C-alpha cells in the first residue's frame, strides 16, 4: 500500500511549482471523490455487511392436529441455515478489499503522473512570466534611451518583436495550463471536480 505522502514524494522534487502539501491535499480529495474508487469502496461495504447465514420462511396448511400442532389450519415457520465451514463471504470481503486497494493504487499512480505534467507545465509558465517581465522592462529601457537620443529608434523593432513573442508564448502556455487543470479535475474528481480544480489551480499557480 502506498501512502499519500510517499506518492507525493515520488515526484515532488522534479517540479518547483507544486509543494508536497498541495500535492497531498489534491491526492486526498481524489481518494475520497474518484468514482472508480468509490465504486470499489461501495462493493467492499456491501460484501462486509452480507450475512454468513440465510433464513427461509416456510408456509403450510394442516387439516388436523399433530404432535407439534394441536389444531389444523395455516401455519408458518422460519428455517435458518448457518453453514459451519462456509467461508465464501469472508473470501468475498478479502477479494473486495484487495480490489479496492488495487484500484486506489492504479488511480493514484495515474493521477500523480498527470500532476507531474501539470507542475512541469506550471514551471514553464513561471519561466515565461519571468522572461516576459525581463523583455518588457528592457523594452521600456530602450524606449527611454531612444527618447533621450542615446540610441537609434531602429533598435526598438527587435526589442518589441522579442517582447511580443515571449508574451504570446506566455499566454499560450497559460491557456494550456488552465485546460490541463480542468481536464485532470474532471477525470479524477467526480462530483468534487470543481473543488479539485481549485486545488490544482492553487498548486500550479
Image: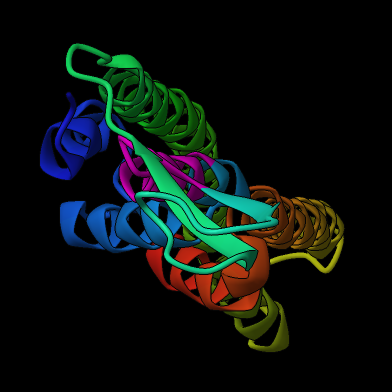
Judged left or right of residue 176, residue 140 is left
Res 202 quadrant in image: bottom left
Residue 23 seen in render: yes
Image quarter of the N terminus: top left
Determine the residue positioned at 19% across, 11% down.
85
On screen, residue 90 above or below 171 = above
Determine the residue positioned at 69% across, 50% down.
180
Question: Residue 111: horizontal and vertical position, in percent?
Answer: 49, 37
On screen, residue 171 above or below 191 = above
Residue 150 seen in render: no
Question: Residue 167: horizontal and vertical position, in percent?
Answer: 74, 62
> Which contiguous range is marked in magenta?
40-56
On screen, residue 84 above or below 152 = above
The residue nearer to you, when weighing 117 against 145, is 117
Question: Residue 193: horizontal and vertical position, in percent?
Answer: 63, 68
On screen, residue 76 above or below 183 = below
Question: Residue 48: horizontal and vertical position, in percent?
Answer: 31, 43
Amino acid at each position: 500500500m502506498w501512502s499519500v505522502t510517499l506518492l507525493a514524494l515520488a515526484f515532488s522534487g522534479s517540479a518547483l511549482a507544486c509543494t508536497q502539501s498541495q500535492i497531498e491535499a489534491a491526492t486526498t480529495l481524489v481518494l475520497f471523490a474518484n468514482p472508480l474508487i468509490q465504486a470499489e469502496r461501495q462493493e467492499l461495504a456491501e460484501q462486509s455487511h452480507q450475512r454468513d447465514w440465510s433464513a427461509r420462511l416456510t408456509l403450510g396448511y394442516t387439516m388436523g392436529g399433530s404432535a407439534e400442532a394441536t389444531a389444523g389450519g395455516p401455519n408458518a415457520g422460519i428455517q435458518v441455515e448457518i453453514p459451519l465451514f462456509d467461508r465464501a463471504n469472508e473470501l468475498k470481503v478479502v477479494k473486495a478489499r484487495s480490489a479496492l486497494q488495487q484500484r486506489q493504487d492504479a488511480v493514484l499512480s495515474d493521477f500523480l503522473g498527470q500532476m507531474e505534467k501539470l507542475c512541469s507545465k506550471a514551471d514553464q509558465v513561471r519561466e515565461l512570466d519571468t522572461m516576459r517581465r525581463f523583455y518588457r522592462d528592457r523594452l521600456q529601457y530602450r524606449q527611454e534611451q531612444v527618447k533621450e537620443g542615446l540610441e537609434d529608434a531602429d533598435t526598438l523593432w527587435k526589442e518589441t518583436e522579442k517582447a511580443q513573442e515571449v508574451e504570446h508564448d506566455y499566454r499560450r502556455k497559460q491557456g494550456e495550463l488552465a485546460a490541463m487543470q480542468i481536464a485532470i479535475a474532471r477525470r479524477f474528481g467526480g462530483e468534487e471536480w470543481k473543488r479539485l480544480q481549485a486545488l490544482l489551480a492553487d498548486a500550479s499557480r
